[in-house]
Each structure stands twice: as structure tokens, then as C-alpha cells.
Amino acid sequence: MTPTLVIVPGLGDSGPDHWQTRWQHKFGAARVRQDDPDQPTPGAWAARLQETIEATPGELILVGHSCGVLTIVHWAAQTGGHGRVRGALLVGPTDAEAPQTAALYPAVRALAPLPLTELPFPALVVASENDPYTTFARAEELAAAWGAELVSAGEAGHINVASGHGDWPEGEVLLSEALHAWTPPEVVRF
């Protein structure tokens, strides 16, 4: 059985044209809805992720973007994970500790410091080489700390609508590869 996706948006809840929202509708994914999607706090945002995980049956793959990535790593650090979470696709992690990010979006600073502990499930970090919110070198550091594989998206901006990633078909390819990699060994895909 294919795991259910759990969409974990960043600031602003990833609007209607964002690839996360499109994936939610296309793949029948569950979605984390924060009370205030413009004011992140590690505790409240992680608690809402936990609620969504508990309310969604079956095996799960978390799909985070930007501050949604940070929500996932804070949640994992706080809870130690959940037995039904089989992996995560972490796209465009925002560096909440970087001065330039805090200058653009002061609310993001609330997510600092970033947990730098290995995640309790396999993860794939997809990072852009010209993301205004995280340098590629920092994304490499974060992926290594989280025990995640890193994939370069090239010069793709923040991998959002503003950078031309509404549909993001390359992301679907990465998602497919990730889902295949996390399929239980007793399941054979043709």
C-alpha cells in the first residue's frame, strides 16, 4: 500500500497555485493547517503536525516546504518521530538562523535554533543553489545533520510559485523515487 502524503506548508500556508496544494488535490494528501500560518512557533506548529499525523491513518510520508521543513525537524526532535512516518521529502529548507532570512521575514526567527539531530526516518532534502532563504552550503550542512540525502534542484529559487514552480514535475519525479525507496521490501513494484 502506498503511504499517504502529509503536506506540511511553510509561511502563508502555501497558496492555491503552490505545488504543495496541487499535490494535496492530485494525490489525496492530508494537510497540516496551522492556526496562524504567518507566525510560526516550534511548539505549536509541531503539535499541529502531531495532531494531523494522529488523525491520518496508515503509513505516512511528510512533505515539507520552507518553514514546513523546520516544522518537521522540530517535531521529530520533540517527539522522536512516529512509527507510521516512513520518510520525508524536505524541500527548500529555510535557514531561520541566517540574518538575511530574519531581515526578510522576522517571524521565521522564532524557529531558531534549528534542530541538528538525525531524523528517525529516511529523508530527502531538495535544495536550490540560489535560494534566497538558505545557501546551498547551509542546506548541505542541514541534510548531513539530519542524516538525509541531498539533491540539488539547480538554480530554482525558493522552489515555490514565485520561482515558477506551480506544477513542479521534477518534484513529482523525486517524490516517486522517494516513495519507491520507502516501499516495504515485501511489496514489488512493476
Image: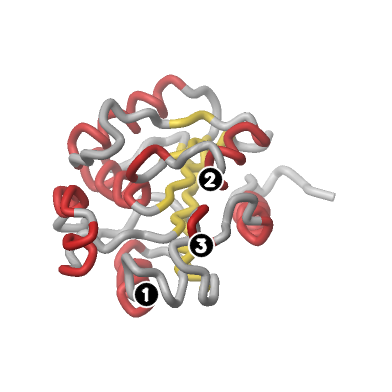
- The residue drawn where x is 38% and y is 36% is 82
Identified by mark 2, the residue type is His
Helix, strand or loop under label 2:
loop
Identified by mark 3, the residue type is Ser
Helix, strand or loop under label 1:
helix
What is the crowding at mark 1: few (fewer than 14 residues within 10 Å), some, or many (at least 20)? some
Residue 4 is drawn in which quadrant?
Answer: top right
Would residue 187 be found to the left or right of residue 18 on screen? right
What is the crowding at mark 2: few (fewer than 14 residues within 10 Å), some, or many (at least 20)? many
Q: How many labels does the image show?
A: 3
Question: Which mark is first along the chain, 3 or 1?
Answer: 1
Give yes or no for contact between labels 2 and 1 (Cβ–Cβ under 8 Å). Answer: no
| Residue at the disc numbered 1 | 140
Would residue 44 be found to the left or right of residue 3 on screen? left
Q: Could you tell me how far apart the alpha carbons at marks 2 and 1 are, in whole angstroms?
A: 24 Å
What is the crowding at mark 3: few (fewer than 14 residues within 10 Å), some, or many (at least 20)? few
Helix, strand or loop under label 3:
helix
- The residue drawn where x is 30% and y is 35% is 37
Disc number for residue 77: none
Front residue of 181 and 36? 36
Most extreme residue toward the right is 190
Identified by mark 1, the residue type is Glu
Q: Could you tell me how far apart the alpha carbons at marks 3 and 2 are, in whole angstroms?
A: 10 Å
Q: Could you tell me how far apart the alpha carbons at marks 1 and 3 are, in whole angstroms?
A: 21 Å
- The residue drawn where x is 33% and y is 44% is 11
| Residue at the disc numbered 3 | 163
